[in-house]
Amino acid sequence: MESTLKSIYSTLLNLGYQISPEAFKLIKESENPETLVSELIKKLESMKVKPIVIEPYHIEPLISKKITISTQLEKKKERYESHIKILRSGGKYSVDSSPEAFRLYFLDRFKKLKSILNLRADVKAFNNSNKKVKVVGIVNSKKETKDKILIELEDEKGITKVIFKDKDVRKKAVRIMLDEVICVFGTIIEKDKNIIIGEDIIWPDVLPKTRQNIKREGYVVFTSDIHIGSKFFMKQQFESFIKWLRGENNEKEIASKVKYLIIAGDIVDGVGVYPNQEEELIIKDIYKQYEEAAYYLSMIPEDIKIIIIPGNHDACRQTLPTPPIYKDIGAPLYSLKNVIMLGDPSFIEIENLIFLVTHGRSLDDIIPIIPNCTFKEPQKAMIELLKSRHLAPIYGEKTPIAPEPEDVLVIDIIPDIFHAGHVHVWGVSEYQGIFVINSGTWQKQTKYQQSIGIEPAPGIVPVIDLSNFKIITLNFL
């Protein structure tokens, strides 16, 4: 029986599912665990939105034998079911990387963002007439000269060249990124119908968000870039943070009401991530780094649900969208009862609010090219991603992208809260009713960061009060 249960547990893990202790107990106590799990897998694989964690309510309808469940377990099921829903998370563990796969990937991106643009009132209101046209396309190239900006827009029919000459329009055109999808209004040049003079640019953008007036209580805590294993990991300050979550520090009133902790990647420092990294590691074994991480997170009260996505320092596939941290390497984290391991990006519904969580790797690509964006204020660059409605618009630079059949990096679900990390500088803003949060780091400046000009702002923790939807920041330095 024990070997059968171990086999069942391994099978579910290999398929990408976690299982709660209560759900596993139901399987164990059933008349035929193997048959039950077989039916369960069929049910889960047929679901449009697959659960990350298998809970009792996934299993109960499949059990013919009546099993009495405690009132406490029923309450836990209701609480989980009503308060946390995984809308979409990460990507597949393996993908086709052929040229045709990339063509289909960008075609899906184009179609999704074109649909979003066509729903905008300003785009719908414009009708082609005589020489005046609107063109929706993916930006294929961009060149800037002293007095004009030239781009190529590609759609299913071919390529349209756009010239921006007007000074005010050029100011907008400077912000155009390669591989994003935009709409251009302009005038056709008589000599060549494939060339237009651009007169305005429309991005997909997000419409103003109106939050539902729902009574909520409690707090959500945001953090990222812990970098356990690094010599520069701020152990003392992070331990103060853990003590605060346990109610052993200042601000006990807030700590006692914390319900969720969301970690946006880089739990550990990893191994071989950048040149000569081993010189800056105090724990040189990736498995032991995760053991240390689990040790810290195990001290957090179990009634706080912890959601973790991977970062580029974590043990995971390095291309976006990224599946969760590998189960064999990150096993200590998977063993924690209150931890949910997700991929990058993840759209999560918590307390009827939508959270978009990503590590933020593409910030390396867009901050250097967009005016008024700097690594000192990452939240501004995150707002630009919302305008583009895409988490990694530029292909072929620092951010690797996997050509999955569907481009899940498109922001087609409008969040209430947009959370990222990666750049090691915290920042908070609001755009169109959406809170934009970068949660900083728990790592001091490394030699590598110093060499590329990154100045961390560590030890700052943003917290949202769900009762009034206000953000506060706690300083653990």
Image (tube, helix red, strand yellow):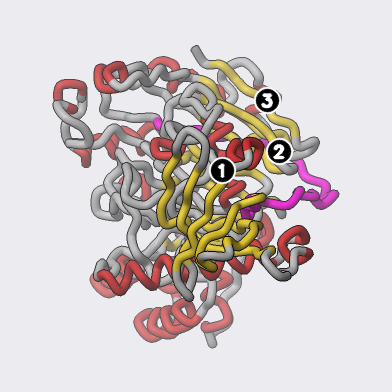
> Looking at the image, is mark 1 or mark 2 earlier in the sequence?
1
Magenta residues, start to end? 201-225
Which residue, given by chain and number where applicable, does mark 2 sit on? 218
The residue positioned 48% from the left and 19% from the top of the image is 459
Report, in whole angstroms, how far the alpha carbon at label 3 lies from the one at label 1.
36 Å
Instruction: Find out whether the residues at labels 3 and 1 contact each other: C-beta distance under 8 Å.
Output: no
**On the picture, is 7 further left or further right than 394?**
left
Q: Is residue 324 visible?
A: no
Position of 436 relative to 70 (above/below): above
The residue positioned 36% from the left and 70% from the top of the image is 103
The image quarter containing residue 269 is top left
Report, in whole angstroms, how far the alpha carbon at label 1 lies from the one at label 2.
43 Å
Nearer the viewer's eye, disc 1 or disc 2?
Answer: 1
Residue 143 x/y as whole percent: 42, 44
Amino acid beneath label 2? Gly
**On the picture, is 62 further left or further right than 322?**
right
Mark 1 surroundings within 10 Å by alpha-carbon count, few (fewer than 14), some (14 through 19), many (20 or more): many
Amino acid beneath label 1? Ala
Amino acid beneath label 3? Ile
Say the numbered circle drawn on residue 173. 1
The residue positioned 64% from the left and 57% from the top of the image is 186
Position of 240 relative to 43 (above/below): above
